[in-house]
Image (spheres, rainbow, N blue to C red):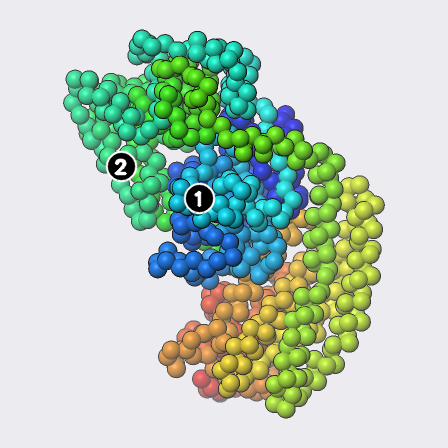
Amino acid sequence: MSTSNPELDLAWRIVENTGMHMFLTGKAGTGKTTFLKELKRRSPKRMVVTAPTGIAAINAEGMTLHSFFQLPFAPYIPDTVFNAGKDAYRYRFSKEKIRIIRSIDLLVIDEISMVRADLLDAVDSVLRRYRSSHLPFGGVQLLMIGDLQQLAPVVKAEEWELLSKHYDTPYFFSSRALAETQYATIELKQTYRQTDAHFLNLLNRVRTNTADRRVLEELNRRYKPQFVPPKEERYIRLTTHNILAQNINERELGKIDRPTFVFNAVITGKFPEYSYPTDETLTLKQGAQIMFVKNDRSPEKRYFNGMIGEITAIDEKGFYVRSKDYPEEIRVEQEQWDNSRYTLNEKTMEITEEIEGTFSQFPVRLAWAITIHKSQGLTFSHAIIDAHDSFAHGQVYVALSRCRTLEGMVLSTPLGSGAIICDNTVERYTSGIERRTPSGDNIGEWEKRYFHQLLSELFGFSQVSQCFEDVQRLLVEHFHRLYPQTLERFNALSPVFQEKITDVSQRFANQYTRLVSEQADFASSTILQQRLMQGATYFAQELLPFVELAQGLSLPTDNKTLKKRVDETTDKFRHAVSLKHSLLEHVKEHGFQTGDYLKRKAILALEAEEEETSAPAKKSAKKSKEAKLEVPEDILYPNLYKSITTWRGKKAKEAGLPAYCILQQKAVLGIVNLLPDTPKALQRIPYLGKMSIEKYGDELLEIICRYMKDNDLKTNI
């Protein structure tokens, strides 16, 4: 991403090319939301976008933190167990949610200023638990977006009584998990909302709590106690409390001597009330002042979120609006908002947003007045600021910064020093932002470190080795008499793993470490890429005996307690070795690039888990005729075995995948020995998953049935 904004370019490099956590901040109107939209559109990283409130989540086109991580609204107290009936921290996630959590690279939290420290730590606890990682946030990269000088987190007195024993402040930067990390801060400086340098300076003085007497005098020149807004200018009044805005809107609507029209929203599925983007019931008249609450997605771009207009004509079907911001009269149509949740596309293995509910309504609200809270993120050409009852940190700044120009702003009451409420804690934190802002050289080092970290992950075999040893130990302790041949194979391969994989990988690490450090343009270095592809070729070949060992591993036992340990241990070994081998095969063919590697790793991990869940140990066979079957270990029909393996090899070559990714060896044995002749019979074959049957079932049945007919055989199921 190359722009004329150096801070945005730095932010893009950090998110895309490093694993560094980042806090992206800046004054109102500096492009934080635009950056997020561009990131979602272009980044190859697997990300989940969240926000602390329903409205913020809808605006960011994501989910609330509480919803995605299934957290209650009660305070999270570190190192304690919370239990309050249905609001307990159960961590009862679906398999799909767990798979998403394990596969994401980047967690985005928008409007971070409103996120409490304990909420961030609750998120950390979920990520560590389900990613089986001791690293903060489970090793997921964190992108926090927001402005601490705007709205603060809400914390009740009784909640703070509990939390204050564990946190210095309620703000996100007091999170215990975040304190364990190193994170970069990028402050966007270029303002797109306001262009008046004088007005920008006044706003910045308010934002940084340096508004002295002269600044207040300058702002209070806009105090006009008897001001009657010209109708054609479409002024909107910003108030501190919802009831004030509601009363003003109802009063102004009542002054219009025109017929009333009522439009009810159409709500489908799950769409919580706190996330409604506008009123469920809109009461409008011709002449009413409205504000659009959504951007027009049509090519004409006739309106935008925050644009003020007047209804010029209306009937039961809809209405027209005229605005100073658009030359022509606008026929307003109903719009739809989606309440989404993240799901896995089982075919592409990509994280997708699934619509859980919809809210359809005209994209407007009455707009003689709105609350300052609801104005966050909006821009107005003309506004009346009513902030004399401001009660929270950042309210006055949010209100003032909604205005494009000083001339377009009117104060209904003068601003005193007491109206500008700033939290000294925030002031102390933001005063250190410059120290946490990285230079281009810093980011270059982080990029190199991240690249090297991923290489060490790919060419490191400690996890595979540990899983191998765990199975070997299990065999020695419990199965040395039952399965002596299997134990013998493990014992024979143990020194091979040490000599040909572990020892070589350590020497190879020295090579790629030196090449990465020596190459200025390391990511595109031909020498480095050739060496990495050669290394991937070697290790993929040497790992093959272990892949075959893992795929054919079966340790049946009648001991229920032991069976659970056996299943977990063998599954981990099978998953670790197959994932490693598949990644090596991919790099062998395509080289190593950060984005491509991350995407391939996530897809392969999810595919492997899908295959594992189809195994008998993962199934509860409630009906005997649907249960997976026991398979003889000897090959009963060698010629059919040859036909199936030849077909599998051809499919693997076409897909550019290892053969076991098409069909596991245990599944091949089941097909050959049991002769399934119907789709239902195929479902009973061990290690043959639903996706594999959908993809290849017809072809497999054709091969089997032809063989059975030629040899006058009947099914063994």
Residue holding disc 2: 280
Residue holding disc 1: 160
Q: Is residue 300 left or right of residue 125?
A: left
Q: CA distance from mark 2 to mark 1?
A: 34 Å
- Above or below, 201 relative to 599: above
Quarter in which the C terminus is drawn: bottom left
User: Looking at the picture, which amino acid does disc 2 mark?
Assistant: Glu
Residue ID at (83%, 51%): 514
Tell me where residue 477 sits by quadrant: bottom right
Residue ID at (61%, 85%): 478
Q: Quick one: 346 or 641, which is closer to the camera?
A: 346
Q: Provide the secondary structure element on which disc 1 rests.
A: helix
N-terminal of the two: label 2 or label 1? 1
Q: Quick one: 614 or 56, which is closer to the camera?
A: 56
Coordinates of residue 488 in the picture (x, y in percent) = 70, 85
Q: Is residue 231 left or right of residue 706?
A: left
Q: Residues within 10 Å of mark 1 (few under 14, many from 20)?
A: some
User: Looking at the picture, which amino acid does disc 1 mark?
Assistant: Trp
- Which numbered mark, 2 or 1, is in the foreground of this view? 1
Q: Provide the secondary structure element on which disc 2 rests.
A: loop
